Image (spheres, rainbow, N blue to C red):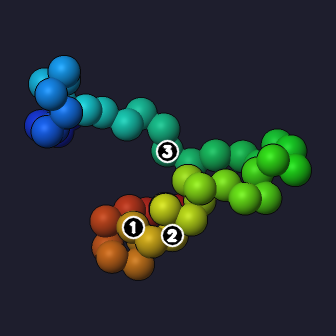
């Protein structure tokens, strides 16, 4: 868990790691784009 600046929360946690493309709705996935950006910055592994 990490401290957060969200006023109504004390900490945040993202339990999701990876995904499986299951439909055509996945073609424009914002999470995949963000993961690639974070990977380029050394903040995430795909």
The residue identified by callout 1 is: 38
Q: Farthest front residue?
A: 7
Q: Nearer the viewer, residue 31 or 39?
A: 31
The residue drawn where x is 48% and y is 38% is 16
The secondary element bearing badge 1 is classed as helix
Q: For residue 3, which quarter of the picture?
A: top left
Say the numbered circle drawn on residue 2. Answer: none
Q: Which of 3 and 6 is in front in this view?
A: 6
| Left or right: 9 in relation to 14 | left
Q: For residue 8, which quarter of the picture?
A: top left
Figure check: 8 above or below 33: above
The residue identified by callout 3 is: 17
Q: Nearer the viewer, residue 31 or 7?
A: 7
Q: How far apart are marks 3 and 2 (CA)?
A: 13 Å
Q: Quick one: label 2, few (<14), some, or many (20+) residues within 10 Å?
A: some
Say the numbered circle drawn on residue 36. Answer: 2
The residue drawn where x is 19% and y is 33% is 6
Q: From the image, state whether disc 3 or disc 2 is nearer to you.
A: 2
| Tag 2–tag 1 contact (CB < 8 Å) | yes
Q: Nearer the viewer, residue 37 or 42?
A: 37
């Amino acid at each position: 868990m990490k401290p957060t600046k969200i006023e109504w929360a004390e900490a945040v946690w993202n339990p999701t790691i990876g995904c499986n493309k299951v439909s055509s709705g996945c073609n424009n996935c914002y999470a995949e784009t963000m993961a690639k950006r974070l990977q380029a910055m050394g903040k995430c592994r795909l």
